[in-house]
Each structure stands twice: as C-alpha cells, then as structure tokens.
Amino acid sequence: MRADDETYMNAALDEARKAALIGEVPIGAVVCMRVSLLVAGTICANTVKMRLTTQK
C-alpha cells in the first residue's frame, strides 16, 4: 500500500466518524485523482430517508 492510499483511507474513515457522531450510518467517501484528494464527504442515509418520508 502506498502512503497516499493510507492518507486517503484515513480521510474516508474521518468522514465516517463524522457521520456516526450525528447519528448517521458511518460511511465516508473520498474521490482522488493521481496524488490529489479532490472531495471528501459522508453519505447521510438517515437524513435522506427522513426527508423523503416527510415529503408526502
């Protein structure tokens, strides 16, 4: 594993921890290109589900 890979994985894990802290499913994601981290974020499944169920 390259050092960059470990850095990107740690960034994704940090995002997952952020999601868990707000009661979301702990999923973190990063988008990388070559040696640059382009985007980091969380997937907020619970929030989307709540939003979808209240838009009747």
Image (tube, helix red, strand yellow):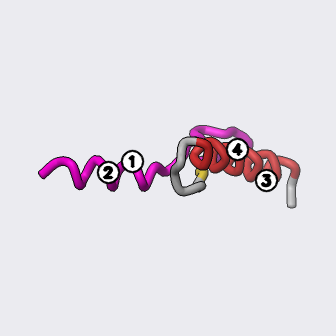
Q: Is residue 38 visible?
A: yes
Q: Tag 3: Cα neighbours inside 10 Å, few (<14), some, or many (≥20)?
A: few
Gap in angstroms between the C-alphas marked 3 and 2: 34 Å
What span is colored magenta in the figure? 30-56
* Numbered label attached to residue 5: 3
Where's residue 35, x and y in %? 74, 42
Mark 4 or 2 closer to N-term? 4
* Numbered label attached to residue 14: 4
* Numbered label attached to residue 47: 1
Gap in angstroms between the C-alphas marked 3 and 4: 14 Å
Which is more foreground, mark 1 or mark 4?
1
Which is more foreground, mark 3 or mark 4?
4
Asked whether 43 or 29 is in front, the reply is 43
Gap in angstroms between the C-alphas marked 3 and 1: 30 Å
- Amino acid on which disc 2 is placed: Met
Q: Tag 4: Cα neighbours inside 10 Å, few (<14), some, or many (≥20)?
A: some
Gap in angstroms between the C-alphas marked 1 and 2: 5 Å
- Amino acid on which disc 4 is placed: Asp
Tell me the residue that label 2 is attached to.
50
Element type at marker 4?
helix
Which is more foreground, mark 3 or mark 2?
2
Q: Tag 2: Cα neighbours inside 10 Å, few (<14), some, or many (≥20)?
A: few
Which is more foreground, mark 3 or mark 1?
1
Where's residue 8, x and y in %? 73, 48
Q: Tag 1: Cα neighbours inside 10 Å, few (<14), some, or many (≥20)?
A: some
Tell me: 22 left or right of 33: left
Element type at marker 1?
helix
Q: Dots 4 and 2: beta carbons under 8 Å?
A: no
